[in-house]
């Protein structure tokens, strides 16, 4: 429907902008030169606006088609077979992330740097939607005893990519979608979300930055400091416990709460049996969330930590 409307809009503009109509505008008696200039500027503005609107809908339609095609692969062939088929179009496609009963079910790419797939889709074409991207410092098989792998995605207003990740800020949504599935190679992994955090990408908390993507821990004590911080900062007290040595998946997207805001979802690797026996019904909203310092500053509040 949007494509049809934009086409009609273009046709209307085309009629206005014929040489004959321009001639009428300039040759009408009694119209002053300033008015003619203003009229011309308005017409040109209309043309540019129509062009931009058309580009917007065209890009959106192309993205929808791309995602539907990939989604059909995933549904019909299964995650791992779909990855192999899709990687024939782009060898950067390394895996698939799926959260059941949500629109988050996408291929995961890995570029040569962490910025490339913020501006390119899963086929490597320029796109404002980007693609889900595995951090260049990580690998799905966790080489080098990597305990935490990170996947980035754009926060799109239409809810695609990681645009709906913000729903995890809602307690009921979390209770209904605590599990995340990750496919790569011949492997399928399951994760349980244990923390949802609002962080700053700039200096925070007396000049330090809490690192949710920390991947190596010297010992249990160092891990516990990191893990306890993730619990204190979580918007939801999930009641899900994590132990030293557990594998962790981190999902990251931008947020609109303040400049440089990031929404981070942390999940721990689990088995099918453990997942089926994990009860998140006792999860509650965290009564004392530890926000980034900028969150308090922008609200005129004293930083309490």
Image: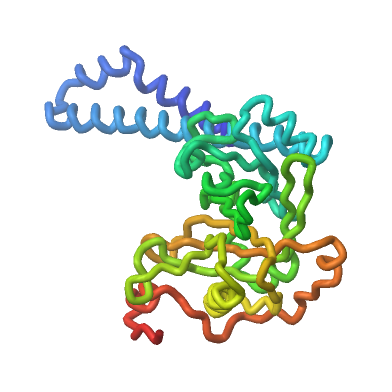
Where is residue 114? Give x, y as percent.
48, 44
Q: Please, is residue 8 above or below residue 301 in the view? A: above
Near-viewer residue (22 or 246): 246
Q: Is residue 274 visible?
A: yes
Where is residue 189? Give x, y as percent.
76, 53
Near-viewer residue (55 or 176): 176
Where is residue 218? Give x, y as percent.
55, 68
* Residue 197 as seen in the image, left or right of residue 83: left
Q: Residue at x 25, y 21 (%)?
A: 25
- Name the residue at the left extreme: 33
The quadrant where residue 193 appears: bottom right
Q: Residue at x 57, y 62 (%)?
A: 166
Quadrant assignment for the C terminus: bottom left
Near-viewer residue (47 or 212): 212
* Residue 20 as seen in the image, left or right of residue 68: left
Q: Please, is residue 54 above or below residue 300 in the view? A: above
């Amino acid at each position: 429907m949007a494509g049809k409307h934009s086409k009609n809009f273009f046709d209307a503009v085309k009629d206005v902008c014929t040489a004959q109509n321009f001639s009428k505008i300039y040759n009408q008696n009694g119209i002053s030169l300033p008015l003619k200039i203003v009229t011309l500027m308005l017409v040109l503005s209309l043309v540019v606006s129509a062009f931009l609107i058309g580009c917007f809908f065209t890009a959106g339609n192309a993205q929808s088609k791309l995602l539907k095609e990939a989604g059909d692969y995933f549904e019909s062939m299964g995650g791992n077979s779909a990855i192999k088929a899709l990687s024939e179009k782009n060898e950067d496609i390394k895996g698939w992330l799926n959260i059941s009963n949500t629109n988050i079910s996408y291929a995961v790419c890995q570029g040569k740097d962490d910025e490339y797939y913020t501006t390119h889709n899963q086929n490597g074409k320029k796109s404002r939607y980007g693609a889900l991207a595995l951090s260049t410092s990580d690998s799905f098989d966790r080489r080098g005893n990597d305990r935490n792998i990170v996947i980035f995605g754009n926060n799109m207003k239409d809810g695609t990519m990681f645009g709906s990740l913000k729903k995890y800020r809602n307690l009921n949504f979390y209770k209904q979608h605590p599990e995340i599935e990750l496919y790569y190679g011949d492997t399928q992994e399951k994760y349980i979300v244990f923390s949802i955090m609002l962080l700053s990408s700039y200096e925070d908390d007396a000049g330090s930055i809490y690192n949710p993507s920390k991947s190596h821990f010297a010992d249990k004590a160092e891990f516990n400091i990191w893990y306890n911080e993730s619990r204190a900062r979580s918007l939801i007290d999930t009641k899900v416990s994590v132990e030293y040595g557990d594998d962790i998946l981190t999902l990251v997207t931008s947020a609109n709460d303040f400049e440089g805001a990031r929404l981070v979802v942390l999940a721990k690797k689990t088995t099918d049996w453990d997942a089926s026996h994990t009860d998140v019904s006792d999860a509650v909203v965290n009564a004392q969330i530890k926000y980034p310092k900028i969150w308090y500053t922008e609200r005129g509040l004293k930083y309490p930590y």
